[in-house]
Amino acid sequence: MSAVRDQQEGWVITDRRQEIDEPSLYKVLLHNDDYTTMDFVVRILEDIFHKSTAEATQIMLNIHNKGIGVAGVYTRDIADTKVAVVHEMARQNEYPLRCSIEQA
């Protein structure tokens, strides 16, 4: 709120709040495959998504059992960056690990 001086009446209180839209959030998904090792997926989750070993292991098992799992939820720019980093790290280690995003 702000106060504005009115010449005739004195002070007038006006409400100048602006609506700020929260950015959309996106789930970063890791996809199961028959070649990427479980240890590598845990390492990805620890190094890129900053998960504890216990949490990374649980997510990895979810990916292994269900075919897909959520590594984290982020704004679009951060999610895109995480996907690019996962793909680059997988490529460097010669794994076909796929990572994608979907709106949360």
Image: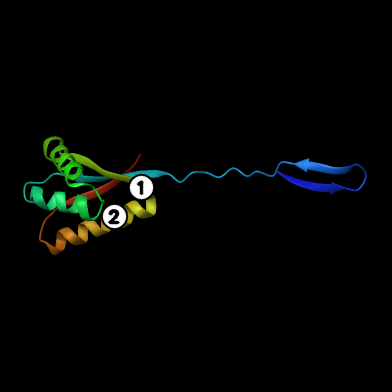
Residue picked out by circle 1: 74
Residue at image coords 16%, 39%: 58
Residue 75 at what x, y percent from top left? Answer: 39, 49
Task: State the quadrant of the N terminus.
Answer: top right
Residue at image coords 28%, 55%: 82
Q: Element type at marker 2?
A: helix
User: Mark 1: which amino acid?
Assistant: Tyr
Residue 73 at what x, y percent from top left? Answer: 33, 44
Specify the label residue 61 is tagged with: none
In which image quadrant can residue 68 be found? Answer: top left
Q: Work out how far the residue at label 1 is from the one at label 2, CA to CA, in angstroms.
A: 9 Å
Dots 1 and 2: beta carbons under 8 Å? yes
- Looking at the picture, does residue 86 appear above or below residue 23? below
In which image quadrant can residue 17 be found? Answer: top right
Residue picked out by circle 2: 82
Colour setting: rainbow
Viewer-closest of 88 and 6? 6
Q: Element type at marker 1?
A: strand
Q: Residue furthest right?
A: 8
Residue 70 at what x, y percent from top left? Answer: 25, 41
Viewer-closest of 1 and 104? 1
Residue at image coords 6%, 46%: 34
- Looking at the picture, does residue 17 appear above or below residue 81? above
Viewer-closest of 12 and 75? 12
Task: State the quadrant of the C terminus.
Answer: top left
Q: Residues within 10 Å of mark 1 (few under 14, many from 20)?
A: some
For marks 1 and 2 on the same chain, the one whose residue lies earlier in the sequence: 1
User: Mark 2: which amino acid?
Assistant: Lys
Q: Is residue 29 left or right of residue 36?
A: right
Q: How many tags in the picture?
A: 2
Residue 99 at what x, y percent from top left? Answer: 22, 50
Q: Residues within 10 Å of mark 2 (few under 14, many from 20)?
A: many
